[in-house]
Amino acid sequence: MTSRLSRREWMQLYGGATIGGLAAGSVSGVARADLASRNDAPAGVQADVTGVQPCSLVNGQVIQPQKVIPSIHNTEVLVVGAGPAGTCAAIAAARGGAKVTIVERYNHFGGLSTGGLVLVILGHWVTGKKQVTQGIGEEIMQRLDKLDRGIVNRRDGVNPTVDAEALKHVTGEMVLEEGIDVFLHSWAAEAIMDDNVVRGIVFQSKSGRQAILADQVIDTTGDGDIFAAAGADHERRKYHIGLPYRIGNLDRVDRSKSNGQRPPRHIGSVTPIPGVNWVNMHGPDADGLDVRELSRLELNHRRQIWKQVEQLRSTPGYEEVYLMETAPQMGVRISRALKGTENLTLDGVKKGQRFVDCVGVGGAWNGDHQEWDIPYGSLLPTKIDNLLTAGRSLSHEPKMSDLIRVIPNCWVSGQAAGAAAAVAVRDNVLAREVSIPKVRELLLEQKAYLG
């Protein structure tokens, strides 16, 4: 007769996360579950082996049954979100000696810099044409330099533009070179908690609902999905939501037909591909966490884009211009911002505020001010342990949004978070206990610029 395990013994043995409509269990073990061979789940808890676990309608309420979610993977550093910050975080952690896993809901790396068609590398230099984005971010640009049609306008004091597919290729190759475990098509759903310590995530994919356990977790979802699920203090904000797009055949425009008219609007900016421009769209301030709002904006933006391109095509000489693509990802710029142990302010940037725990240096949009420190505390929650964030969700006041969210500054803060996580794993300490001098030493080894 099979002996019965207590609920906590079950969780420790199998490393599963009990997630239900009524309760959530904690995780202490790290063993991989083989639930298909077990039948001794705690009374009332079902092992979700097949992924088919229907909810019930009870008195008009949808009830999800309590169940054990299979833990399919263990890692030292888990990066959730493979945008600019997440990609650099994963690479930095791997180069720091950690076993790294990255989870991404889309089918590519780069986030809004690729899937969002935000193709301009804006914010990597400051007054005096000094480039402060170094390290992994600079390596990405150097690799793009070597590709035909990878990057254009790469020179001092100019904001270069990349090709989305080239950037997907380069970042994908860099991730694979480091031996990083990759889960694409995987949407992070829950944080796995042991008291106030994050132990991993539950994610949803076509394989069902599964869990990954980790020693250190980095939230680079952009929307702070993991730190919000973990209960970290944060602010929810509205900001511009647009939808960039690309137009083609601009090399076939016959300007002799213009009859002296001014060039039409919505031409956009040059890309590395001849005859192809990308067009930005700022959009209205909206809630990037409201699915109804996102759906409404998506449809309205697409209608507006089609109308703009048709107007362009009706202009004499522009008849062959066409809409190549709209961005697969909505251009959500800001949604959640962590409340970290330190907070970035625009006044601090203007006054040249320095931090003893500086782990990165940010740049400006148009080189119109000096460099500014990114403190480790802006990546670190006040109460939740073994969790860091980077990119647009780090701790900052609203006036800083236009600086922290641009691609080069996301590269920089992502590399900082990855290096810190690697040091924490190496020293077997909590993320908030990590040695800042050791983090800075590792970052300098990785050619980051720290001022």
Image: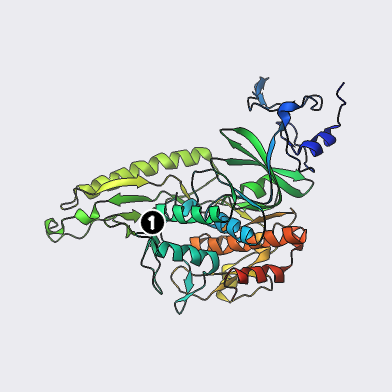
Give the residue displayed 39% in from the left and 72% down from the top. Answer: 155
> Could you say which is closer to the camera, residue 300 or residue 423?
423
The residue that label 1 is drawn on is 163
Left or right: 51 in relation to 30 = left
Q: Is residue 171 left or right of residue 204?
A: left
| Classed neighbour count for the residue bearing mark 1: other residues with Cα under 10 Å, few (<14), some (14–19), many (≥20) | many
Locate residue 428: give its quadrant: bottom right
Q: Residue at x 66, y 50 (%)?
A: 227
Q: How many tags in the picture?
A: 1
Q: Amino acid at mark 1?
A: Asp
Helix, strand or loop at mark 1: loop
Splitting the image into 4 quarters, where does residue 4 fall? top right
Percent position of residue 191, x then y: 69, 44
Measuring 22% from the left and 56% from the top, which residue is drawn there?
Answer: 251
Residue 225: x and y in percent read 62, 46
Measuring from the top left, give residue 185's x and y in whole percent: 53, 40
Residue at 54% over, 55% down: 177
- State left or right for residue 330 relative to residue 251: right
Eyeballing the image, is 449 above or below 312? below
Q: Quadrant of the N terminus?
A: top right
Q: Residue furthest bottom?
A: 128
Estimate the x, y position of residue 133 in percent, counting from the top left.
51, 69
Residue closer to the observer: 132 or 310: 132
